[in-house]
Image (tube, helix red, strand yellow):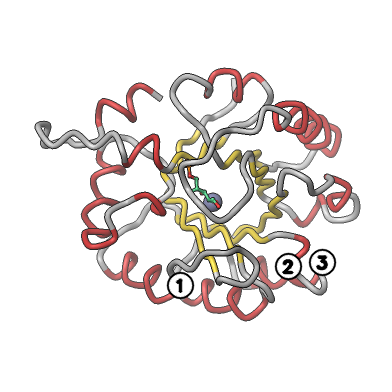
Amino acid sequence: MPDFKLAPSILSADFARLGQEVYDVLASGADIVHFDVMDNHYVPNLTIGPMVCRALRDHGVSAPIDVHLMVKPVDRMIEAFIEAGATYVTFHPEASEHIDRSLQLVRDGGCRAGLVFNPATPLNHLDHVMDKLDMILLMSVNPGFGGQSFIPGTLDKLREARRRIDASGCDIHLEIDGGVKVDNIREIAQAGADTFVAGSAIFNARSESDPHHYDAVIQAF
Ligand code: DX5
Ligand code: ZN
């Protein structure tokens, strides 16, 4: 039985109250903070950078922070997020000039490294770097926005990624990102994912009447 982890994507949090939102989801039982970084170049949206990651650490957030870089080029932001207190740094192979070097940069900085695959990006970018990975992240939507629908073909790709991980003998997490909901997470887990990003499904379910705003939805997952 894999050790399943839930990673709320703060892209759908209330940015005006970000510190409290992060505390609330962690207090309700979430495991990891998923931190989406968009540059209006690699993806058509603009979000938050290393200063916000540093601010969360300075605010006392000690949970793992999973930085998903949707930026091009990647290396400068890798260095900045290492300094800012990231735990995982993942990036898209298309956004790096030298994938092996960027992965090494992440690990040399003491962080865990991962590659992210868009729905149409083939898994063969994994071929020569399995031993440099701590995480494989499959996008089940096209990157750039929260609130999109899960692309069903991702399930086969998850099974393929799981086969590759098992065959490698390496200790690599398999994360899924995009359109994850209470009613499809079981099927996604059965296809091989062990780490689940969920943005809108968690933050849009905020319960104003309950002081533990996210207990119900996080328990449902
Ligand atoms: C999209 C981001 C996701 C996004 C997921 O580019 O990488 O992390 O926040 O949002 P939902 O769970 O709403 O699909
Ligand atoms: Zn993400």
Mark closer to the chain start, 2 or 1: 1
Quadrant placement of the C terminus: top left
Residue nearest the viewer, comparing 39 with 74: 39
Which callout, 2 or 3, points to the residue nearer the camera?
A: 2
**x and y, in percent, of residue 178 in the image:** 55, 40
Of the residues under marks 2 and 3, which one precedes in the sequence? 2
Which one is closest to the eye, mark 1 or mark 3?
A: 1
Q: State how far apart marks 2 and 3 are (Cα).
A: 12 Å
Q: Residue at x 35, y 37 (%)?
A: 202
| Tags 2 and 1 touching, CB below 8 Å | no
If you read the primary sequence from the N terminus, does the residue marked by circle 1 or circle 3 appear first?
1
Query: For mark 2, what is the residue?
Result: 95
Rounded to the nearest angstrom, the CA distance separating label 2 from label 1 is 17 Å
Residue tagged by mark 1?
A: 49
Picture coordinates of residue 104 (x, y %)?
A: 74, 68
The label on residue 100 is 3
Q: Is residue 20 left or right of residue 135?
A: left
